[in-house]
Image (spheres, rainbow, N blue to C red):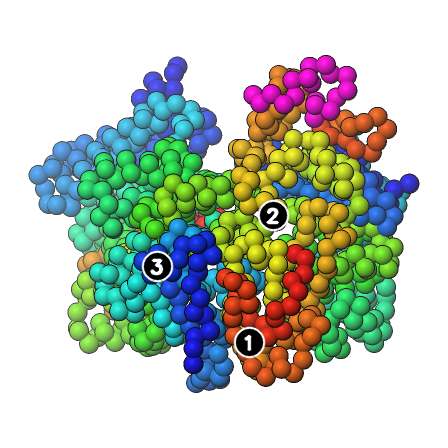
């Protein structure tokens, strides 16, 4: 059976047989997983196209995922063995080094799966996260059967709530880190490159922001605005995280600034803007990527903490942190409420940390020239 | 009996791209009190040879292949117990490196580092170690040695630090000093001072010197005999004067022709075309043939051995042109 | 007070046309302040470049030689205004660099370029070679369309001895010599007339050095370039340069035509330098004069009064006069300047 025909049925499998279990495994699990979803949730999938945006995205993700996995595998299988690619950039080298780190690759797979699940949640969640089933019979039901991970004190399905909670955590994580990395990188680069009073002003500002205790600040702002809007939380988390990135970027830029290729750019009459954007920042990104990845885990924990304290998103929005908090009173009788939500937090954060550490190792001395 | 006798040394490194045969069959001898120079460009294997002698090759990924032999003072160093090797290092065989700034520990004073060696190998107590250390600093020409003893490396210039390195290397009266590009990082006037120092110390202590460099001028000034390396092998050996005035191997000839000498402004430089091939993938036959203007079929068919240039002379070259039995060497001089 | 340097560089019989003088450097100084203490006050000055003057004729190569700390690299960068001079005047093609507006400065950046020493650090590791060269062309408006620019990139690569397929590769995929060629191609992309070569071959292997030296010479001949060739290797400087200036502690101590300098150096430092350079001819080792300087290259922070070279000077006639005033760079023989009051004296053998 040729590779191509094997790949047509089980994309990713021939690659795994050849030892490329990272790429192959990713492709195969996505294919099989999404196929399974499609087959078991056919009705919902069909209905999804006409439904709310959520559901459309979910159905779209399934289709895109299946096509992507299949297409990639077919393309990969048809490529000649050692394709002579001219130009092995720094990112390809990093990818190569990264792939050697098994644990990090697992981390990436977990992260990708968590994102996929978050996207297709409307299709696969067995119940609506806010719907309360019968308060008489379905309250605090143990895991199994209709409620795979049990129900909580309001007869809501824990499993569905965890899945919807993933969307919350991940989007907060992503957006908060996105904000902080953008602000931090720009300010750090400008400050480091221009030096002088710009540098002094920005760095004193950084010192100021960093000296605020983050969680306390979050609590104060939420209390002040009397709003638990998800956007407020994202904004506050993002706006308090950027100083770390700024400092790191500034450090990189300070040493990059003296490198001869920067001097060459100046000698060639390039504007400062061009130099900062096209020459300095791309070379300073390595530590930023690492901190961003680790930062997502950090933000998820922070948000969970906030919700745990009751200051995060309000019910019935299913945040993992509030689920852990809800389950606190029932730890002995209905351990599944806190446990599974807590595990979800741990799994996600660990996965991000593994990816971040893997990136740090892969980026480290190789690109430090 | 030579002081150091290296026979068929092979040091290979395992890399992602394959096995890099950095040193591939090197044999040399250094007699007591003699100066041997190893000259070659980057990638020829000269530094790896030196590190192999002292057992300083990191063990993955590098490995000294079985069949190699390094005999010092009639003692085989390969396979010897690590403790014995540590006894020899810094003691009977010393080494100095190219970058004095990074060879010394920046958080310890210079004196501390000299004392360390003295206390370890000669068992001196602190007071004697200090006195000996100061005397050593004076011997290598450091002014105000008593004060400099307590200075930190960053407070001293490159030339001074190299002198300190030499002092440390000499502290246990080694029989052999290996110097790996000791003056490459230094200014030319300082280089001259350091070379003079090395030569005078060598004479005074009766020490043998194995000098590794890429600079033929340094070889000319300091070495009695010279070994030219290319592609992990020795391609020419002989007395310095002969090699520099009548080189036999095309690579040596090419090296000499590609340097501007003082006084030849109008002569166009004749660089060796091409670049050094990768150690993972040495060409078949003679490793130099792709860049050699005298190469002919025989060079691709088989790799030449190190052949004596004239019967009975100590000169040899790894080149078919030198083979007295080969009548086809009459083609020499025809560029291919 | 007359400027010590008022000599027209007419060693090649060009005569003193001002139009032929591409670069006129007058009394250039660059001092770097040393900050100490909590408030970061400036407590001393590092006199990296201390009153340097010379002229560069169109089409010639002036070699600038000296050991580390002598200020040659700083001079090169100050001339291009990559570092702002502390004082002094720079005239490029007759115009005062101080008075350039933005447009003129941009133009200057096209006409005067630099090639660096370090083949590893002088290229952006994240850009392909082709991308790098195309960017230069784009910024300066050389080449209307992407297609034009690609063609020009291929031309540039060809000029420096590389191939078109190299355009898609990244710097780390090349050897040191090739990277240096890329750096040269980059400098040539703006079609300059003057290039400061800052130790362009010092970091290269011997056989590669020769290739790059040949390339630089060929380019000069083909494109009519003017070079300021900064190096510490005396043989290379001699080979490349028409005239040579020797620097010590921020000052030029001798300047003359190349053959003159190497056959009959007049400043004691030049003589020591030439004597210290290791020679490949083992015979010469025995017969030429050996001058060994004692001590280290001093730091340019606290210059003592008088001749900067006094402390290490091996001149037999050195005395208190040498310490009383800084010797001026004066003409000791036609076209041959030296800064030593004990000159003229019989020139020694090189």
In the depicted structure, whether residue C20 falls above or below residue B329: below
Q: Is residue A141 magenta?
A: no
Residue for point 61% across, 70% down: C343
In the depicted structure, whether residue B149 falls above or below residue A302: below
Q: Which residue is mark 1?
A: C327
Q: Are marks 2 and 3 on the same chain?
A: no
Residue A102 visible? The answer is no
In three-dimensional space, the C-alpha distance between marks 2 and 3, rounded to whole angstroms, equals: 30 Å
Residue for point 32% across, 58% down: C19
In the depicted structure, whether residue B119 falls above or below residue C324: above
**Residue ranking furthest to the left:** A50
10 Å crowding of disc 1: few (<14), some (14-19), many (20+) = some
Provide the secondary structure element on which disc 1 rests.
loop
10 Å crowding of disc 2: few (<14), some (14-19), many (20+) = some
User: Is A51 displayed left or right of C261 in the figure?
Assistant: left
Indicate the position of residue A37 as horizontal and vertical percent values.
25, 34
Asked whether A361 or A166 is in front, the reply is A361
Q: Are marks 1 and 3 in contact (CB under 8 Å)?
A: no
User: Is C228 displayed left or right of C137 in the figure?
Assistant: right
Residue A135 visible? The answer is yes
Q: Are marks 2 and 1 on the same chain?
A: no
In three-dimensional space, the C-alpha distance between marks 2 and 1, rounded to whole angstroms, equals: 29 Å
Magenta region: which residues? B319-336
Q: Which mark is residue B263?
A: 2
10 Å crowding of disc 3: few (<14), some (14-19), many (20+) = few
Q: Is residue B326 magenta?
A: yes
Q: Which mark is residue C17?
A: 3
Number of disc labels: 3
Indicate the position of residue B308 as horizontal and vertical percent values.
79, 28
Residue for point 42% across, 24% down: A81
């Amino acid at each position: 059976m040729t590779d191509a025909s094997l790949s047509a049925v089980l994309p990713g499998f021939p690659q795994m047989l050849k030892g490329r279990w990272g790429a192959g495994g990713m492709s195969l699990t996505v294919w099989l997983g999404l196929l399974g979803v499609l087959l078991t949730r056919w009705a919902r999938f069909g209905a999804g196209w006409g439904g709310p945006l959520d559901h459309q995205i979910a159905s779209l993700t399934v289709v895109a995922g299946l096509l992507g996995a299949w297409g990639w595998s077919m393309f990969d299988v048809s490529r000649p063995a050692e394709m002579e690619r001219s130009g092995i950039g720094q990112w390809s080298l990093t990818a190569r080094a990264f792939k050697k780190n098994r644990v990090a690759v697992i981390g990436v797979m977990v992260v990708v799966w968590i994102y996929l699940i978050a996207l297709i949640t409307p299709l696969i969640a067995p119940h609506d996260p806010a719907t309360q089933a019968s308060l008489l019979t379905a309250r605090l039901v143990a895991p199994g059967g209709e409620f795979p991970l049990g129900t909580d004190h309001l007869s809501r399905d824990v499993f569905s709530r965890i899945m919807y909670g993933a969307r919350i955590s991940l989007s907060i994580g992503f957006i908060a880190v996105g904000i902080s990395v953008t602000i931090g990188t720009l300010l750090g680069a400008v400050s480091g490159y221009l030096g002088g009073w710009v540098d002094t002003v920005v760095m004193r500002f950084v010192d100021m922001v960093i000296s605020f205790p983050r969680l306390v600040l979050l609590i104060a702002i939420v209390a002040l605005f009397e709003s638990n809007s998800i956007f407020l939380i994202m904004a506050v988390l993002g706006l308090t995280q950027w100083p770390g990135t700024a400092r790191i970027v500034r450090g990189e830029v300070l040493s990059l600034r003296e490198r001869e290729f920067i001097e060459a750019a100046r000698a060639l009459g390039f504007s400062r803007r061009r130099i900062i954007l096209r020459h300095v920042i791309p070379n300073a990104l390595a530590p930023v990527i690492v901190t961003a990845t680790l930062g997502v885990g950090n933000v998820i924990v922070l948000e969970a903490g906030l919700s745990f304290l009751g200051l995060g998103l309000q019910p019935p929005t299913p945040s993992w942190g509030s689920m852990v908090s809800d389950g606190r009173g029932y730890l002995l009788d209905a351990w599944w409420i806190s446990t599974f939500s807590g595990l979800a937090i741990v799994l996600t954060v660990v996965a991000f940390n593994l990816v971040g550490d893997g990136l740090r190792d892969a980026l480290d001395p190789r690109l430090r020239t | 009996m030579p002081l150091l006798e290296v026979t068929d040394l092979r040091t290979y490194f395992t890399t992602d791209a394959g096995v890099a045969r950095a040193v591939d069959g090197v044999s040399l001898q250094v007699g007591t009190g003699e100066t041997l120079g190893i000259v070659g460009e980057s990638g020829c294997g000269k530094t790896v040879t030196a590190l192999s002698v002292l057992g300083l090759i990191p063990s993955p990924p590098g490995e000294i292949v079985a069949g190699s032999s390094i005999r010092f003072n009639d003692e085989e160093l390969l396979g010897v117990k690590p403790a014995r090797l540590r006894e020899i290092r810094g003691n009977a065989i010393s080494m100095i490196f190219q970058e004095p700034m990074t060879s010394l520990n920046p958080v310890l004073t210079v004196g501390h580092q000299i004392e360390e060696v003295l206390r370890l190998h000669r068992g001196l107590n602190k007071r004697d170690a200090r006195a000996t250390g100061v005397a050593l600093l004076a011997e290598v020409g450091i002014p105000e040695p008593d004060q400099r003893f307590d200075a930190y490396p960053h407070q001293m210039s490159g030339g001074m630090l190299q002198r300190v390195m030499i002092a440390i290397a000499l502290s246990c009266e080694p029989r052999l000093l290996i110097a790996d590009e000791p003056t490459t990082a230094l200014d030319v006037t300082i280089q001259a001072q350091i070379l003079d120092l090395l030569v005078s110390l060598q004479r005074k202590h009766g020490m043998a010197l194995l000098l590794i460099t890429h600079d033929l001028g340094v070889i000319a000034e300091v070495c009695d005999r010279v070994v030219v390396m290319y592609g992990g092998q020795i391609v020419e050996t002989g007395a310095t004067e002969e090699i520099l005035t009548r080189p036999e191997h095309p690579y040596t000839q090419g090296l000499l022709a590609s340097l501007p000498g003082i006084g030849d402004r109008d002569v166009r430089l004749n660089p060796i075309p091409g670049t050094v091939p990768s150690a993972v993938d040495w060409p078949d036959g003679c490793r130099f043939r792709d860049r050699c203007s005298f190469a002919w079929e025989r060079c691709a068919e088989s790799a030449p051995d190190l052949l004596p240039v004239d019967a009975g002379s100590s000169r040899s070259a790894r080149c078919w042109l030198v083979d007295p039995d080969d009548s086809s060497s009459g083609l020499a001089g025809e560029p291919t | 007070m007359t400027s010590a340097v008022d000599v027209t560089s007419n060693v090649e019989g060009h005569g003193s046309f001002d139009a032929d003088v591409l670069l006129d450097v007058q009394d250039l100084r660059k001092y770097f302040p040393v900050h100490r203490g909590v408030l970061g006050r400036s407590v001393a000055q590092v006199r990296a470049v201390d009153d340097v003057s010379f002229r560069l004729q169109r089409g010639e190569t002036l070699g600038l030689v000296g050991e580390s700390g002598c200020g040659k690299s700083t001079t090169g960068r100050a001339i291009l205004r990559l570092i702002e001079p502390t004082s002094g005047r720079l005239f490029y093609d007759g115009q005062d660099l101080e008075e350039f507006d933005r447009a003129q400065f941009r133009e200057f950046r096209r006409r005067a370029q630099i090639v660096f020493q370090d083949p590893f650090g002088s290229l952006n590791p994240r850009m392909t070679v082709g991308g790098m060269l195309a960017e230069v062309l784009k910024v300066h408006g050389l080449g209307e369309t992407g297609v034009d620019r690609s063609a020009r990139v291929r031309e540039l690569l060809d000029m420096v001895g590389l191939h078109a397929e190299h355009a898609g590769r990244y710097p780390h995929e090349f050897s040191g010599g090739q990277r240096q060629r890329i750096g040269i191609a980059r400098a040539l992309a703006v079609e300059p007339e003057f290039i400061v070569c800052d130790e362009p071959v010092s970091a290269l292997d011997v056989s590669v050095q020769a290739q790059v030296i040949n390339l630089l010479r060929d380019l000069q001949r083909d494109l009519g370039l003017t070079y300021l060739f900064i190096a510490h290797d005396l043989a290379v400087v001699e080979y490349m340069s028409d005239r040579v200036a020797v620097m010590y502690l921020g000052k030029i101590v001798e300047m003359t035509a190349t053959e003159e300098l190497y056959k009959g150096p007049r400043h004691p430092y030049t003589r020591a330098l030439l004597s210290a350079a290791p020679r490949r001819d083992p015979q010469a080792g025995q017969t030429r004069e050996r001058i060994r300087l004692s001590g280290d290259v001093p730091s340019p922070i606290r210059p003592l009064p008088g001749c900067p070279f006094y402390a290490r000077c091996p001149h037999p006639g050195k005395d208190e006069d040498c310490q009383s005033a800084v010797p001026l760079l004066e003409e000791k023989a036609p076209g041959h300047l030296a800064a030593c009051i004990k000159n003229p004296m019989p020139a020694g053998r090189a």
